[in-house]
Image (cartoon, rainbow, N blue to C red):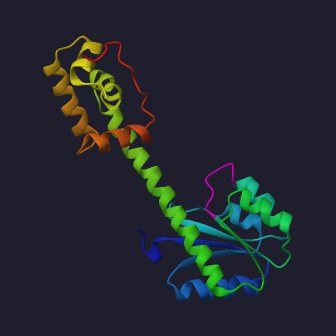
Amino acid sequence: MAEPKDQIVFIVDDDRRIRESLSELLSSFDIRTVAFGCAAEYLAHPKPDLPSCLVLDLQLPDINGLDLQSQIAEGRVPPIVFITGHGDIPSSVRAIKAGAIDFLTKPYKQDDLMRAINAALAQSRDSQQKVAELADLQQRLSSLTPREAEVLPLIVSGLLNKQAAAELGISEVTLQIHRGNVMKKMGADSFAELVRKAMVLSVPVTRSRHSRR
């Protein structure tokens, strides 16, 4: 799990006092912040590859917070916590349906805000871990030989060694060698782990043309 210093909270609010108070609050929890007075400043700022979230005011001088949410949803968007002094039910429903973690009305309770921010950062960490895992698995998959790449979907489909061997027209002993290589290259210590990794990679299930005997 990332340490507080390895995560960041972006604050977009046109009220300087709100920006400063939020930055001070989060700093007391050793959470790094970067604050902006408008959406354009946020959009122009480089985004580090760290777990992050966006504390976003609904009413901004250049663009509505909901419109900004829609705009950045087209790319890699951090989890959003909305804060507003002009909240209404339709806006909150739209924000939550679009994936916002929470929609808080000013004045909000500090505990509610921190709970929402911590949830957003946890979601961001989880998303980054999944992206990293997928990249690692894709690299492992690409390291398989053409024959091993043929073996993988057969064995994760639950075929017996003799069935998988028959599918490929090779001996069962040769199939077992390929299977061991696949397990090693995919970093799987068990069949169950190999199946899980294959599911992450969307490896297709293969049905045997040879019935069990």
Query: Magenta stretch: dominant SS?
Result: loop
Q: Is residue 17 left or right of residue 8?
A: right
Percent position of residue 120, x then y: 58, 68
Identify the residue at image location x=33%, y=32%.
Answer: 156
In the image, residue 95 above or below residue 172: below
Q: Which quadrant, please, contains the N terminus? A: bottom left
Q: Is residue 75 magenta?
A: yes
Q: Is residue 23 left or right of residue 194?
A: right
Percent position of residue 196, x then y: 37, 43
In the image, residue 204 above or below residue 8: above
Q: Is residue 7 left or right of residue 136?
A: right
Q: Is residue 29 left or right of residue 151?
A: right
Q: Number of callouts in the render?
A: 0
In the rendered image, is residue 63 in sight?
Answer: no
The residue at the far front in this view is 213
Identify the residue at image location x=25%, y=33%.
Answer: 182
Q: Is residue 86 magenta?
A: no
Look at the image and give the residue range highlighted in magenta: 73-79
Identify the residue at image location x=51%, y=56%.
Answer: 127
Percent position of residue 137, x then y: 37, 42
Percent position of residue 195, x then y: 35, 39
The residue at the far left in this view is 173
Q: Which quadrant, please, contains the C terminus? A: top left
In the rendered image, is residue 152 in sight?
Answer: yes
The image quadrant of residue 116 is bottom right
Residue nearer the viewer, 40 or 8 = 8
